[in-house]
Image: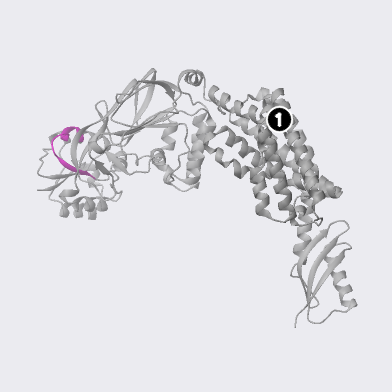
Amino acid sequence: MKNIVIADETAFKNLKPTLQEYIEETVDEIIFDPIDKVEFLDSNRYYSYYSDHQNRLILERIFDKNIKIGFLPHPEAVHTISGFKIPKDTKTAIDELLQQEEEQLREKSMLHHDKTVILNYAVIGEISSFVSSKKGNTSWFGRIPTFFRFLNKLKDLRHKPLKLYVDDKEPMDTCATDMLIVQNAQNASVSRLLSNKNVMSNTVFHAFVFAPRSILDMLKAYVIKLLLGSNQKNKDFDFLSRFVCSTCKIESTMELSFYIDGEKVVSNEFSFENKGRFILIPGKTFSEEIISEDKVSKLYQSKTLPRGEVKKQLIRKKIPFISHASPDEYKELFTQLRENARPSQNYIVLMVLSTILACLGVFADSSPVIIGAMILAPLMAPIISLSMGVLRQDRHLIRGSIITVLSGMTVAYVFAIGLTFITPINNMNAEITSRIKPNIIDLGIAVISGAAGAYAYSKESIAKTLAGVAIAVALVPPLAVSGIGLAWGELNVFFGALLLLLTNLTGMVLAAALTFLFTGYSPFRLARKGLLISSFVVLSISIPLGYGFFKVVKENRIIQSLNSHEIDGAFLHHVRLEQYDPTTIALDITFYDYPTEEELSQIKHEIEQIVGHDVTLNIGIRLKR
């Protein structure tokens, strides 16, 4: 057996002299003859140092002849290097190939388009070439220029009518913006995102079909890849269909541009299959296991392919920025929202139980109990229905949702006030005081929670996150605190907690309406009026919330300026602002000896100098011995 390098003479002579000498000393023979003149013998091993085009010609010559061959990193063999995972360092590559024992050689077939050998992958359309690009493996900053080129391509993105014939399945009349055909699912970034098995078969290959309903879908996919990198296993690309099959034929009523290993081919019909066999000498990095035909697991994921009316709508015009919900999605969601907008016995019972639980949690100063009340509370459902009614100007949905929300609040107030009257506890604690001073941060929480709630309702697969949204927005606890304040006759508690409740409610309505708009449940012309009204209400509430936020900032500055401060050998600890106007500060002061009135007056004077105005101090004295 001889180890023979067959090489492009010009490229070989361009190698470093030391590397040329190393290869000449390592192998038995180097042949520079034209490819059609090389005599291949099955008793030898061959190592090709040729370009992609020449490697295709070599493969066509040796198919089904039991010839053993490996590939070296020629400068113009980009797709050979990628397809066979060849090290880019020539010395490393030749060493790896020469070290392979006979049992490590692999019988290999190649993916073909008609008679053309595909070394790496085939792409229809230009968007998927960005997603499948090897550039996805660069640094985060390195992917940003590619992202802007990607954005430029999106403006002209259109769906192309396709008829797919996959194995012996029924033809699929659909449409797509792009397709990716690849034998090894680990060779392209987009296929690695959906396939976590590093397995290649001689009898099957992978076909990925891109059918995004909007530019936003594509942006979401690319941003995930941009942020997480191409090695992340992320399965949130719901516009991708995947087939693991033996044959695939694509027909179209229009001409398609297919890129076979980067070379453009224009036609309205393409066929793909695995054929032609040879003995591959793999390198160490080519770790795919070629499994036997009886172990091949085929896959036909076509659920997301556009069909019927959806297909007709997509191919009619350029892809929109925001996708429009399908009739089935409309029907399912609106049925649920209309049901949620009606007050029911279960709704009232849950309102009563959650209110009682929230009140008991507040009185017991117990956060876990209050969290339980948040999860139990049913108020979020009619609020989400109200947001859809506002968005689509649906008076019946608005009226039903408002009635349901008000009936729940009325029941909650009745039970909160009644329970407060029979409970012999009337002291303010942390659970109460934390809900009577809302600020702009609370509005931000409500907005994010509303968006998350609407998105969860519109996506059945993530509806289980609704419990988390309910905890985040916390509707019933401020309602319970407001009722407690009313029963105590403490108007500052009542109005403070009520403001927090209204903040949560209005912030959720606006954010949920915007989310439904961006997920395609209403055209903007219909949604404009409701969004303007909601925005005005939220902006109105933002005024006292902004004032409350600035108060919190000032209070924190006062506390930070005093905590751990030293005044004439006395140390200030556990500073708390009990009241802002007039300012009352509670704090502990550590002394070495019991302080005199004069020393306390001096400390008060210095604190007022730090704060900038008169203060009242509630001092706890600690002696350090």
Q: Is residue 456 above or below residue 91?
A: above
Neighbourhood count class around disc 1 (C-alpha, 10 Å): few under 14, some 14–19, many 20 upward: many
Task: Kindly identify the residue that appears in the image at 16 percent across and 54 percent down.
Answer: 26
Asked if residue 542 shows in the view, the reply is no
Q: Is residue 533 above or below residue 283?
A: above
Q: Quadrant of the C terminus?
A: bottom right
Image position, residue 255 (x, y; %): 38, 19
Left or right of residue 360, residue 189 in this image: left
Q: On the image, which quarter does residue 107 sit in?
A: top left
Farthest residue toward the front? Answer: 422
Task: Kindly identify the residue that appears in the image at 16 percent across and 33 percent down.
Answer: 61
| Callout 1 amino acid | Ser
Display coloring: one colour
Left or right of residue 67, residue 160 in this image: right
Q: Magenta segment, which residues?
A: 59-71
Task: Kindly identify the residue that appears in the image at 87 percent across and 77 percent down.
Answer: 599
Farthest residue toward the top? Answer: 253
- Whether the magenta-drawn stretch holds residue 62 is answered as yes
Q: On the image, which quarter does residue 279 sit in?
A: top left
Asked if residue 352 shows in the view, the reply is yes
| Residue of label 1 | 401
Left or right of residue 200, residue 543 in this image: right
Left or right of residue 474, residue 44 in this image: left
- In this orientation, which residue lies closer to the viewer: 338 or 274? 338
Image position, residue 14 (x, y; %): 26, 47
Image position, residue 295 (x, y; %): 25, 38
Look at the numbered disc 1 and give the secondary structure of its residue: helix
- In this orientation, which residue lies closer to the viewer: 29 or 212? 212
Image position, residue 561 (x, y; %): 77, 64
- In this orientation, which residue lies closer to the viewer: 369 or 497? 369
- Whether the magenta-drawn stretch holds residue 162 is answered as no
